[in-house]
Image (cartoon, rainbow, N blue to C red):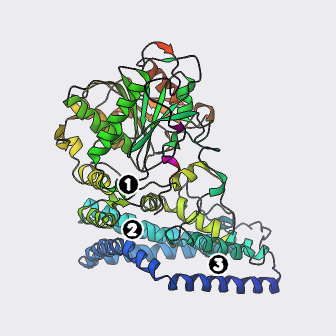
Amino acid sequence: MTDSKPTTPEFKLPDMLKLAQNMGQVFQRGAEIAKLIAERSDIQKKEADIQILPMEQVTKTLGKVFDYYMNDKSKLMMAQMQLWQGYTMLWHAAWAKALGQQIAPMIMPARNDKRFKDKDWQENAAFDFMKQAYLVSAKWAQDMVANADSLDEHTKLKAKFYVEQIVNALSPSNFPISNPEVLKATLATNGENLLHGMAKLEADFKSPDGRLRITQTDRNAFEVGRNIALSPGKVVFRNDVFELLQFSPAGEQVFEIPLLIAPPWINKYYILDLTPQKSFIKYCVDNGITVFVMSWINAGDAEGVKSFEDYMREGFLTAIDAVQKATAAKKVNTIGFCIGGTLVSVALGYMAAHGDSRVNAATFFTTQVDFEKAGDLCVYVDEEQVRWIEGRMEDKGYLPGNRMADAFNLLRSNDLIWSCVVNNYLLGKDPMPFDLLYWNSDSTRMPAGVHSFYLRECYLNNRLSHGNMVVADTRIDLSKVKIPIYNLAARDDHIAPLPSVFRLQDHFGGPVTLVVSGSGHIAGVVNPPASNKYQYWTNKVQAETLEDWMAGAVETPGSWWPHWLEWISSRSGKMVKARIPGDGGLPVLGDAPGDYVRSKGDI
């Protein structure tokens, strides 16, 4: 037995009078907020309308897990024994540690789990025990789902997701009395941190739709056109689907073939133009590419009637027409990002079927055309849930942007929800200014017909990969698309998983260059060379399986942008005189970033 070195406590004695006064105000503010919510019957009805089917889904899905174990009592008994065995071992380890023995933790948080970063989670015996007891319980609950062998894969996926949400919500880090960082802040400030937190909670309830909208970043720190979306350019086309932005050249000469970018219509385009240091658009312009970007409309009542076909015809295909008018170019290169890439894929199949060869080469950022391995978002997609979503869109004809934001936030609830709850409401701190989170919260409304078609045709029925999707009376066969393709996948992508994006090569008929970037769905794309972050993998051999491809791939440190630039430059024609927005066949309608990008989509 060895003596453990005592640590100096950081829990300071408060001014008890001030603490009592502040805590009294905290409880009073909490009661006032609760009363305000109770009196707002419109919010109550709205929340019930939004949440009733998800709660039914949770109950029904977890009920199937419960039934599995009730029908096999031996497995239930074994699971219970495993839980109690874990608690017993943890209890003995805690006693040994209290007696001064050096005991290795029985269970550790995941390496990227930031909830337990405060040193007292490791050094203080009480908090260490609380943390490990929680982790043991969480792993047991997750194992209960994983070991329910007779459940179908979709039910297990949903059960895993629901259990994860419950487990994340019940973390001891989310409660003032069991979070050492919050306790220390409460004692040090005499409870002012909680008082500030209540004020922030009250402010977050005053959202446009009356719902709690947790502030993820300092919303006043950013403004489109002031310190984000700064690349100079003009709006040169506008209809009731999108605005077309043409960016000003950086030099006297540019490549002959212009570039048209189709971003996702569920987000604003400026993820590719956050700041000059992070701007993919600026990078392209600085390297002699004439860049056009589609800025999708934030759908309102009038746009609710739009269909997926409209987004292809009046959106992407019309954008190609406009780019050619503005530049007199015979060919256009294109980039499709995420579901924007899925739309581009459909449009390319449509063009191939009609002998339209105006697209010279295509790049896809984290794009799926085969949805069999579509990943975490599948938890929201089955016939019952799609019908529910369609029912929610019937009234206004569109899906409010914050509904999609909620869905994406839940996929990373510890990082995007509970960390904000702790920082804002328990520690009483202001959220840090973070351009990516500002963009993430700048939601976009989606027309009901477009969203319903995408969910049913792609996620539910996977018709695009099967070659039986029909758009504008045309069967979309991607194998007829023979142009060269640059396929960027992200290794840690939970929205468009690498195994799913890899399959793109199986469906197009031309040469596909696969590049795998480090990090996830956004950071894997927005990774400028100057940041010296992450890495990417390339392989000159087109393998049949992802495992074989990765086994033979070459890893290169840093950004994939220069690799893509070399690829696209060789497919962009000769150098010509730079095109100034408005000097071609389209007049200037306004300055970039335009009007559509400024519209808010909360309600």
Q: Nearer the viewer, mark 1 or mark 2?
A: 1
Q: Quadrant of the C terminus?
A: bottom left
Q: In the rendered structure, which amino acid carries the disc numbered 3? A: Ile
Q: What is the number of the mark on residue 258? A: none
Q: Is residue 46 visible?
A: yes
**Where is residue 405 drawn, in percent x and y?**
46, 58
Q: Magenta residues?
A: 579-597
- Return the mark for residue 177: 3
Give the percent coordinates (x, y) of residue 235: 50, 36
- Camera-side residue: 319 or 438? 319
Q: CA distance from mark 1 to mark 3?
A: 42 Å
Query: Where in the figure is residue 261, as x and y percent of width and height?
Result: 43, 35
Helix, strand or loop under label 1 = strand
Kind of element beneath mark 3: helix
Identify the disc placed on residue 162: 2
Circle 2 sits in a helix, a strand or a loop, which is it? helix
